[in-house]
């Protein structure tokens, strides 16, 4: 049983990159505060796409790892952003509609996870193309 647990832990450590995910969550929260709270324009979903692309680019691995790290980013960032949104709506006096607000936020959470995962794939693909073009330039300079 211990070998199974240590094997799972090592796989999780290899796939999940917590530092890029934390950077992505910080991006989401910063852009959410700037866009929604300060300016009043909601850019939550594009923010998750941008943060997912950044995470996928930073991890510099396969598309599968980009999807997984992007989905984790979407889950953590989505829970935080939707928690802020629910608490703001409650403080504004919409407590009677809390059930419908929470159900709407659950739909948003699923969308945020999917969009961040797609962003992770895009980021991984961009990094792959970026590395490929660097290799071609390096090989051309050697000739």
Image (cartoon, rainbow, N blue to C red):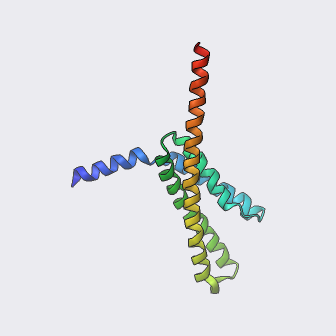
Q: Is residue 11 found left or right of 49 in the rendered image?
A: left
Quarter residue 34 falls in? bottom right
Viewer can see residue 108: yes
Q: Is residue 79 found left or right of 94 in the rendered image?
A: left
Query: Which residue, as the protein is rendered here, is positioned at the far top?
Result: 143
Q: Where residue 35 sits in the image (x, y, percent)?
A: 73, 59
Query: Which residue, as the protein is rendered here, is positioned at the far bottom?
Result: 96
Viewer can see residue 77: no
Q: Is residue 31 found left or right of 99 in the rendered image?
A: right
Work out which quarter of the rendered image holds the C terminus and state it: top right
Q: Where residue 114 sits in the image (x, y, percent)?
A: 55, 60
Query: Above or below — where is 107 with respect to 96?
Result: above
Q: Where residue 64 sits in the image (x, y, percent)?
A: 46, 48
Q: Nearer the viewer, residue 39 or 69?
A: 69
- Residue at 57 percent of width and 63 percent of height: 78
Query: Above or below — where is 93 with respect to 86?
Result: below
Q: Where residue 63 sits in the image (x, y, percent)?
A: 50, 46
Work out which quarter of the rendered image holds the N terminus and state it: bottom left
Quarter residue 100 falls in? bottom right
- Residue at 67 percent of width and 76 percent of height: 89
């Amino acid at each position: 049983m211990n070998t199974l647990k240590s094997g799972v832990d090592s796989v999780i450590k290899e796939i999940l990159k917590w530092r890029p995910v934390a950077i992505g969550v910080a991006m989401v929260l910063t852009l959410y505060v700037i866009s929604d709270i300060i300016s009043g324009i909601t850019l939550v979903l594009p923010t998750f796409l941008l943060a997912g692309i950044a995470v996928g680019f930073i991890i510099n691995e396969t598309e599968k790892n980009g999807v997984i790290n992007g989905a984790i980013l979407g889950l953590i960032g989505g829970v935080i952003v939707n928690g802020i949104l629910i608490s703001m709506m409650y403080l504004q006096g919409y407590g009677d509609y809390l059930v419908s607000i929470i159900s709407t936020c659950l739909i948003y959470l699923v969308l945020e996870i999917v969009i961040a995962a797609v962003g992770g794939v895009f980021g991984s693909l961009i990094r792959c193309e970026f590395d490929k073009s660097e290799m071609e330039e390096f090989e051309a300079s050697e000739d």
